[in-house]
Image (cartoon, rainbow, N blue to C red):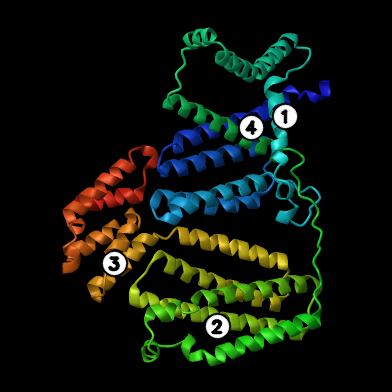
Amino acid sequence: MNLLIPTTSKRTQRLLYVGFALIMAVLFDIFFWKQQLGVSFLLFVLIYLFGLISIAILHKQFNNRLSLFLLIPILVLSADVVLYNNQLVKVGVPFFVAILLIIFTILVSLKNPLKHPFHFSNIPLYSDFILPLKKLKDIYRDLFQWNTAETKKDIFRKIFTGVLIAVPILFVFGLLFAQADVVFSNIMTNFFNIQITPSVTEWIFRSGRVLVLSGLLGSLLYFIFSEEHSLRNFIKDVSKLDHIVVGVILALVNILFLIFVFIQIKYLFGSNNFVMQNGLTFADYARSGFFELAWVVALAAGLVAVILRSYAHHGAPTITKVLQIILILQVGVVAISALRRMHLYQVEYGFTTLRLYVEWFIYFVMLILTSMIVAIIAKRSFREYVYFVEITGLVALTIVCSVNIDRLIAKENVDRYIIEHKELDLLYLDKLSYDAIPEITRAINYGLTPELINLQVWHKDTYLAQKKEAILKKYDSWRSLNFGVVQVLNTINGN
């Protein structure tokens, strides 16, 4: 029996995990309950990182210094929440940061005493994410189970356990008795005199959420700081593809790509005159087949990746490598054609978030395709190639999220309106975040077309007053402080 009871020093060490988990759960509730994300998000991330790293160092569990590189995207993305207000930052970035924090938490204490080659799939939590939940019983034992020699404490523990189990039982029986007898119901009602108001319901919900979050985080910390959290052996199990079959597939796909590119060369890289001469609008030209071409790029890249994975482990004849490279180059041509379509569309109709994100994604795909060629020629392992893609993807995501895209879009479209006298879609710009307000104000100050002037909403004083009122109502706490919003308010007050 004594073996089941943790030693005092071990319990004290592990109770620190529970305390830290409880503090973070309480801060989560305080910072984010009914609040817009702002400076509190960055503050929460900083407190979590400081606490986690401090515990790891204090308990000599800081086993992976390379994990510190993850702090760069974590901190940059967290700072973006304080700087910008666009949809990607407000909705996507908190999710991305949460994933990165979990990965960092797992990696910072990962043990590898046998020096196995690192692979994410060989981290125990990767294959069985239920493992931390099994530590909940250890948390309970650390909190409520003492040494059997300490008789009084053991009695208190048993009493507490009995009360904890009895409460729901008493509630059920009491509810049934109250339904069965009116006198008993009145006595219980007068005795307790409890009114379930919305504030009480909210308090119960928030308290329950704090307990759940602290339990989940505490169990995770219990696991990652245990001996079980060690890297397993990496076993290569990659199917070997037949060279002849793969060669035939690559040859036929290459021929199809070559025919398509040859026949469509003018259409793929058509100039403005080509579009006009063929009776097409810029919208038709840009949209026609764009998503089909995007699927072609994605599927072809996936095909090459499957072949690359097999040949990276088992080797490949020179002719197959050449066919792979030719296919990648032709996929690059299709990707460039898709960029060309999107560029023409933007020149004619201006920027939108979707158009910019699609364009940037194609640039990323082209970089990945180039890295495929390098991996084939340099005979790099598939594991190295995958790590390059993951790191590049994380860097690209961090850069994209760190661009004030709504301000950029508004500025470009307003410049087209003022300098090139092109049509301005103020209704679209108004659907963007508050970051676009300074540029919309610039357009209003320059002067609007008669059609837009007739819309009372674009009267400058009315427009700015409405925006200021909405901002002050939405960002009414220091926890939601956002420097992008502060800049917008300064613009409004300056006008």
Residues under labels 3 and 2: Cα distance? Answer: 33 Å
Amino acid residing under circle 2: Val
Sooner in the amino-acid sequence: mark 2 or mark 1: 1
Q: Residue 110: where, in percent of width, then height? A: 71, 46
Which residue matches tag 4? Answer: 17
Residues under labels 4 and 1: Cα distance? Answer: 12 Å
Answer above or below: position of 200 versus 413: above
Categorize mark 4 by other alpha carbons within 10 Å: few (<14), some (14-19), many (20+). many
Q: Residue 381: where, in percent of width, then height? A: 73, 69
Q: Give the camera-side residue of 482 and 304.
A: 304
Amino acid residing under circle 4: Tyr
Answer above or below: position of 62 versus 187: below
SS class, disc 2:
helix
Sooner in the amino-acid sequence: mark 3 or mark 2: 2
Which residue matches tag 2? Answer: 333
SS class, disc 3:
loop
The reply to whether discs 4 and 1 touch (Cβ–Cβ < 8 Å) is no
Q: Give the camera-side residue of 286 and 227.
A: 286
Amino acid residing under circle 1: Asp
Residues under labels 3 and 4: Cα distance? Answer: 54 Å
Categorize mark 2 by other alpha carbons within 10 Å: few (<14), some (14-19), many (20+). some
Categorize mark 3 by other alpha carbons within 10 Å: few (<14), some (14-19), many (20+). some
The residue depicted at 43 percent of the width and 49 percent of the height is 81
Which residue matches tag 3? Answer: 425
Residues under labels 1 and 3: Cα distance? Answer: 60 Å
Amino acid residing under circle 3: Asp
Sooner in the amino-acid sequence: mark 4 or mark 1: 4
